[in-house]
Image: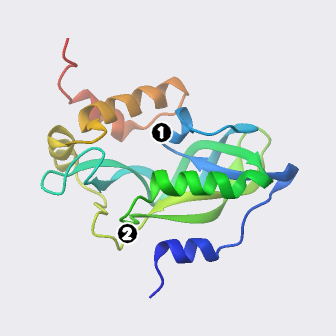
Amino acid sequence: MTSARERAEATPRSADQGGLAWFFGYGSLMWHPGFVHEAFEPARLDGFHRALCIYSHHYRGTPARPGLVLGLAPGGACTGRAIGVAAAREPEVLAYLDARELLTSYVYERRLLPLELLGGRRQVRAWCYVARSDHEQFAGALDEAAMLRHVLRGHGAGGSNVAYVRNTVAHLREIGISEPELERLAEQLPPEPG
């Protein structure tokens, strides 16, 4: 059986309109891409939605006390940001993002999917890191009580899961993206220490 990385590597590289390769940000990539880019536009991905659907065993939790982090789960749509880089830099950015997103467990799979750029109402193909529903770290659609339990307990190399959810909601609000489920969860978190 081929691994997620092998399937992703076999996908042809993107060199869309204007000589740009595109990447879709739906979480921290929107406010901290970590690479220089030539375009940064509001975009919509159909067929997937933003969700706390990944058990975090490293950054926001441990295997014994997993936290929850964002993933693109099947169904619905997700508003985020399309990040365009010069096509010649595509391999460099893919290597950076693979190291950042894939780590060692491959709970995300890199796919080239159609995105709608909302400013100009045009489509591009963009690299997206989607959650693998067949992976043991895929949490799926947990109810709010279960999500809250994991977020309150989770703490890993990147800090507390509570801080992750708070920061995510604050950044989404900052850029005008409403996520009612995440906002309801954030309202139930204890106040920041002061």
Say left or right for 90 vs 192: right
Q: Which mark is residue 133?
A: 2
The colour mode here is rainbow
Q: Is residue 147 above or below residue 182?
A: below
Residue in the picture at 80% in, 41% down:
120
Mark 2 or 1: in front is 1
Label 2 or label 1, whichever comes before in sequence order: 1
* Front one among 26 and 84: 84
Residue in the picture at 60% in, 72% down:
9
Element type where label 1 sits in the image = helix
Q: Is residue 179 visible?
A: yes
Quarter occupied by the N terminus: bottom left
Q: CA distance from mark 2 to mark 1?
A: 21 Å
Place of residue 157 in the rendered image (x, y in percent of width and height, measured from the top left) = 27, 42
Say left or right for 75 vs 9: left
Quarter occupied by the C terminus: top left
